[in-house]
Amino acid sequence: MSILETAPGATRPVRPPRADRSNGQWKVDGRAPLNGNEVWKQEDGGLNVRERIEQIYSRDGFASIPPQDLSGRFRWWGLYTQRRPGIDGGRTAQLDDTELSDEYFMLRVRLDGGALTLDQLRAIGEVSTEFGRGTADISDRQNIQLHWIRVEDVPEIWRRLEEVGLQTTEACGDTPRVILGSPLAGIAKDEIIDPTPVIEEIRERFIGDPDLANLPRKFKSAITGHPSLDVVHEINDVSLVGVVHPELGAGYDLWVGGGLSTSPRLAERLGVFVTPDEAAEVWHGVISIFRDYGFRRLRNKARLKFLLAEWGPARFREVLETEYLGHPLPDGPAPAPATGPGDHVGVHEQKDGRFYVGAAPAVGRVSGEVLTGLAELVQAAGSQRVRLTPHQKLVVLDVAADRVDALVAGLGELGLTTTPSPFRRHTMACTGIEYCKLAIVETKATATTAIAELERRLAGVQLDTPITLNVNGCPNSCARIQVADIGLKGQIVTVDTPDGTAQVPGFQVHLGGGLASADRDEAGLGRTVRGLKVTAADLPDYVERVVRTFLDQRRDGETFAAWAHRADEGDLL
């Protein structure tokens, strides 16, 4: 059995498109569209569909929506058709979007920095309950996703969200997606720099800007000033990470070109220091490079990581400085190693003497009722602010010491524990086949069942370093399978039966991946063992077995990821 692996800290090569033909780079090849997506984006921008939703489709119903709006432009406003119930995962690749689509939508509420006020939290809970059959998921992009949304209800939903300062603008589509931000922005004792002003400037100046609303593909951003490195900066298209320059003071280190999916690549530093005053302009320079030079011929080569693979960091920096900023940026230091967990679970003191309280729902799944109940708890605790994390967790800010215990107890009653087991704390799951048209297997319930089983089976086992378990329903890695200790990529698995063979839901296993954390100095992609697959039903058995093998074989202080990269293949089965 052969092994395909990546050493810790390494990045697998990402091949750029061929150089002997037009790749649809606007500044090189001109703007003539080279595929169907580029044609309809130029004919009518995605932002323009809002008026039709409000004036036509919400009045005339689902059947009135033409295909290019339904499967394309709706995404610019956070709307995807959800999966039609009853279609098994083996048929996902055999059916087209129309056949897979139900007449209901997933609506993604954009939450830059994961920031929610009390009124906003309450509004989302009410929208979920009234229009979304009570559904709500906290994503690992700090958004909240609702399901079962009817197009007839969308204008009223927008009205209610926008009344409290929320939006769904460019929550999906070939646009600047939500900006990940440190959940502790502005309140942490050990914060290097507060990223809130930069996030707000980018949102106010550039989100919804037609000049940035036709990118080659999605564009993901992350900004943090916290030393825990809490925004998964290595897997975003652009990241600004707080550092202290020896002469210029606090600012940001710039990373570009990260992304996972089927061609994973970790972001790279450009080696520059970005001052807070110039951070938004630098962000705009990077996204403008992507707009102008990104590859548009093939959708599967249209992310920024492919351009960086062709150019390299030095050329990217040169183009940024000369063509887009008009001046050089100073060299700057790299971020220091992470100082602690980036999920911010538990009770911790803020710099003002109050406390923040981090809680863990099971794999991000909440509900309208839970969000409404959370709003009541937050108000009773004297707080007005909640932040979501890139790890499907939530943090209540500004809690007085004498109200912490009551808040913790109330959160527990809602299923939002502040003292989760290691497996509940460190397991994530994507939407899966329940709603996603790309999924092959179920994820949320599978992961939740696995957590319960592992809590029971490994109740007496001490894990002094976290073991992350990321469950994904397809190869696209929304749940970040390549950077988990145990990453699970959904697929159909063939198993032996008394009558021959059968195809059942299962997973390909990735082992030993991770992002920079308190237990790991730098990011690295996991290894795969050829032929190592596990059925969904056998998932708890496999995880228990590999964890116990690790504990038996580990060296002093060794993490699961380090062990997984050196272990014999037989020990990983």
Image (tube, rainbow, N blue to C red):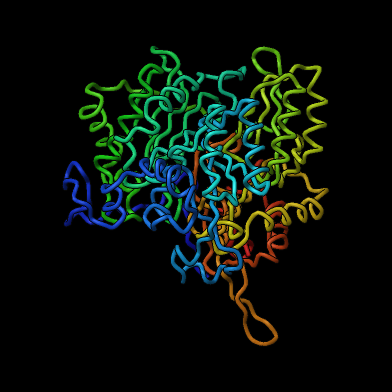
Front residue of 75 and 487? 75
Quarter of image, res 317: top left
Q: Where does the image place residue 553, in percent across and percent down from the top left?
A: 68, 53
Left or right, 118 with respect to 205, comes to right
x then y, percent, for residue 404: 78, 23
Q: Residue at x 65, y 47 (%)?
A: 135
Left or right of residue 121, residue 192 in this image: left
Residue ID at (80%, 55%): 457
Q: Quadrant of the C terminus?
A: bottom right
Q: Quadrant of residue 419?
A: top right
Horizontal and vertical percent for residue 107?
54, 45
In this view, 72 is above or below 324: below
Residue 265 is left or right of residue 383, and the answer is left
Q: Residue furthest bottom?
A: 499
Where is residue 106 shown, x and y percent of the image? 54, 49
Q: Who's the residue at 18% across and 41% down the image?
A: 27
Residue 238 as seen in the image, left or right of residue 503: left
Q: Is residue 116 visible?
A: yes
Residue 390: quadrant of the picture: top right
Total residue callouts? 0
Outermost residue on the front side: it is 59
440 relative to 184, above or below: below
Residue at 38%, 18% (x, y): give it.
Answer: 275
State whether residue 513 appears in this view: no
